[in-house]
Image (cartoon, grey):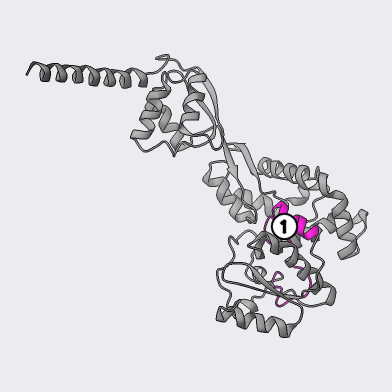
Amino acid sequence: MGATKGYLAALLIVLNAAVWTLVLGSRPVTPGSSTPVRVAVPRGASARDVAKILVRNRVIRSPFVFLLTCRMSGKAAKLKPGVYELTSGMNLPEIVRVLVRGEALQAWVTIPEGYTIRQIGDVLQERGVTNAEAFVHAALTKGFEFSQYPFIGSECLEGYLFPDTYLVARGTQPERVIERMLDAFEHKVLVPYRPQIERAALRHFGLQAQDFAQGLHKLLTVASLVEREAKIPKDRPLIAAVIYNRLKRGLKLEIDATVTYVPGDSRANKSRIYLRDLKTDSPYNTYLHPGLPPGPICNPGLASIRAALEPADVDYLYYVARPDGSHVFSRTLQEHNRAKSAVRKGNL
């Protein structure tokens, strides 16, 4: 009996200590302080990493209590990256709430390869960076107003907004966001690949160096078609080759991804294209109009841009998609029709 009482007393002491650890560990480091402390939470940071960052910046008392609070509340995996303005006068639940809501001064924004202007606007608004409609309007109509970028070949900036991850302040004007993306395009595409761009523009379109912006615009258009058509990496240079081969022979491109594209409106490709879609009266409809569409239909990533610059050395003129997204390539219409039939029957 005495042993049981001793055990219960010890248990109560442990529980009492645990409660006080949680209570004290959740209190502000400096009660009443309103001095801002800027804290950067990097992408990919775990809850344990975040705890170390917060302790280092002296805005929480205990990394253990922070981790325990996050895990018990199911919020350990919900802490969002960004640059936050916290204070040592905030208690631990307040800090966790800010990190979960992503109430950052600056937010990490990832733009996937192949996103359209509309999709980028959606992401920016969702992350609290800028208004989607204002961004779309600026990206669609103000291309030539960014005169510090002489490589721009259209008032519509579809194709030039480089897919990447950006740390951007919330409430940024859309024009400043666009400048960030154009800077990335210049740094990651234009500077390292300019000689290849000039050679490809001359080879495929007969455009000299003095027509650089026009040549780049056409190459980005090809890259955007590759981006929206290719689902696996090895198909990219093959699809680019098909596009150039058909252009050279004067054949319509007949690329499904162009059929329903509307600048400033389109998001992902339609999952299925119907016969009525092929009759859509649009300058982007490559079933109706020969040659390239007026401009890019999305913002291609570096892999698709490289494919447009260095297509495969093949004489294919056709391709058809398998259910897994890969493609069967053909040289003649007869081969292509056989391939389509085989794909429909599940034989390819």
Q: Does 288 appear in magenta?
A: yes
Label 1: which residue?
Answer: 304
Q: Does 12 appear in magenta?
A: no
Secondary structure category for the residue under label 1: helix
Horizontal and vertical percent position of residue 1: 6, 19
Which picture quadrant has residue 7? top left
Residue ID at (70%, 69%): 284
Q: Between residues 175 and 309, which one lies in front from this camera angle?
A: 309
Span colored in magenta: 284-309
Q: Is residue 106 above or below residue 202?
A: above
Q: Is residue 26 above or below residue 169?
A: above
Q: Between residues 47 and 197, which one lies in front from this camera angle?
A: 47
On the rendered structure, is 265 left or right of 329?
left
Horizontal and vertical percent position of residue 170: 57, 37
* Residue type pointed to by label 1: Ser
Horizontal and vertical percent position of residue 322: 60, 72
Q: Is residue 206 visible?
A: yes
Q: Is residue 324 above or below residue 124?
A: below
Q: Is residue 173 visible?
A: no
Residue ID at (70%, 81%): 336
